[in-house]
Image (tube, helix red, strand yellow):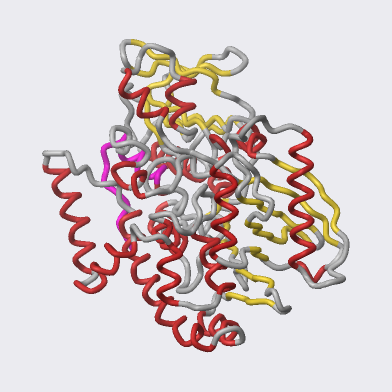
Amino acid sequence: MSAATVVIGAGADELVAAHLVARAGHRVVVLAQGIAPRPTVGWIPPALARALELDRHGLRVATDDPWAVAPLAGGGRLELWQSAERSAASIARVSPRDAARWPAFCDRMARLARFLESVYQAPPPDPTGTGAGAITELARLAWRARRLGRASLTDLLRVLPMPVADLLDDWFENDALKGLLAASAVAGLRHGPRAAGTAFALLDRQVGNRPGVFRPPRSNAAQVLGTLPGIELAGDARAVRIAVRAGRVAAVVLADGTEIAAEHVLSGLDPRRTLLELVEPGWLDPDTIRAVRSIRARGVVAEIEVNAADPGLAMPLVVAPSLDYLERAADAAKYGAVSPEPLLVVRPVAAARLAVELQYAPYSLAGGRWDERRRDGLAHTAIDLLRRSLPAGAGAFEVGAVRTPLDLETERGWPEAQAAHAELALDQVLWMRPTPALARYRTPIHGLYLCGPALHPGPAAPGAAGAHAARALLGATALRPR
């Protein structure tokens, strides 16, 4: 059988890459690495959905409404809705001043996020390139920025490096509202809201959403892509080695010893695992190895499944009472400790079942490793905080599965429990994501490409990195922005 293009991973990015390469006439084999399909989180670029006819094949996008609910210290709750007007009415109950400012804030953030949307639908420009293509890409980026207008461009350049706490303090007075918004900005990051660049992270969460919504939608995009014809999907097969001959990929070796002859390999695994574990030693120079090892992927999230007796808890609850609360929670993780008062994001997944994300539980613990005692401690912390945050008589809770950061790395392939594979930070975006040398999806090994969320544009637009990687392989043009 002829050599194939082998795609490692079966998330939205990997499957988009697989289908685009297959449509160009290549035989494509997808190795799902034994990871069960999960909902796709993030905005699917419309041009990508149209190109693959995802709507016709059953694409469903789900958004929470309200998208966030914060319990208030004095009783009651603050709700943020898909409708900016409805959110303003809820905000007015805690701060009429903040409610009056909410529409302008929503319009400003949505306008800046639309610039990111357009940037995310193209591969990152190469500021060091001298060819016509590199110059054209830089010109397109400059044109998109110029179209913002002088005032909005100045606003963008001011907002991107800001701590989200400073941004929110500029606009609002109510602690609960600022805490709720800041929780979206720091989601998945070790940083607290006073860290530089977290305002950019809030903008990233606005991408593809309605104004005033900072939680990414969920869809069945990966499941739909997995049913489309044209690719060979090997769900249980696991790649354990990428064989290299004379500087180019030659085969992918599976866990059972089978070799798949490979003309190209597109890996959706994180760069460290792909280049430092799967690739045979000796093919990368020391500078590349050092740069890959330096990619920051500091996960701080644990997951707890909870059965709740009270059906009234079926709401997207966020426990983040203030900016100070979040900053203290982040401080604990900074020093290798699980925060005793962490950020909690609670999402209903069934009639009486909740998925609880506990943030500021670091992957790397000071003075120990994740064990059963620490696992039980996570559950206790989450349940105790839920009880204290909800009205009296909220009902009983029963803990189900608890996944520590180590479990998330092992079960889902998230390096250091970082779902984005590389932290979203200003020095790890665009032509620096995940490193300047790897940002164009190609690796130093001929025929080996990276296509996962560690690459531009990251997790905000699942499928886009896969599309850009496929086009890098095929030498085609980028997605056309909507």
- 293 over 281 or under it: above or below: below
Res 45 → quadrant: bottom left
The residue segment tinted magenta is 465-482
- 80 over 257 or under it: above or below: below
Magenta segment includes 479: yes
At 32% from the left edge and 60% from the top edge, which residue is drawn? 118
Q: Position of residue 37 (x, y in %)?
A: 63, 43
Q: Position of residue 342 (x, y in %)?
A: 65, 54
Left or right: where 163 falls relative to 314: left
Which image quarter holds the C terminus?
Answer: bottom left
50 or 17, nearer to the observer: 17
At 63% from the left edge and 77% from the top edge, which residue is drawn? 78
At 23% from the left edge and 74% from the top edge, which residue is drawn? 151
Total labels: the figure holds 0
Can residue 58 be seen at all in this image of the molecule?
Answer: no
Res 299 → quadrant: top right
Q: Position of residue 38 (x, y in %)?
A: 62, 46
Left or right: where 245 falls relative to 395: left
Can residue 97 be seen at all in this image of the molecule?
Answer: yes
At 51% from the left edge and 49% from the top edge, which residue is drawn? 189
129 or 387, nearer to the observer: 387
Q: Position of residue 132 (x, y in %)?
A: 11, 43
- 367 over 195 or under it: above or below: above
Magenta segment includes 120: no
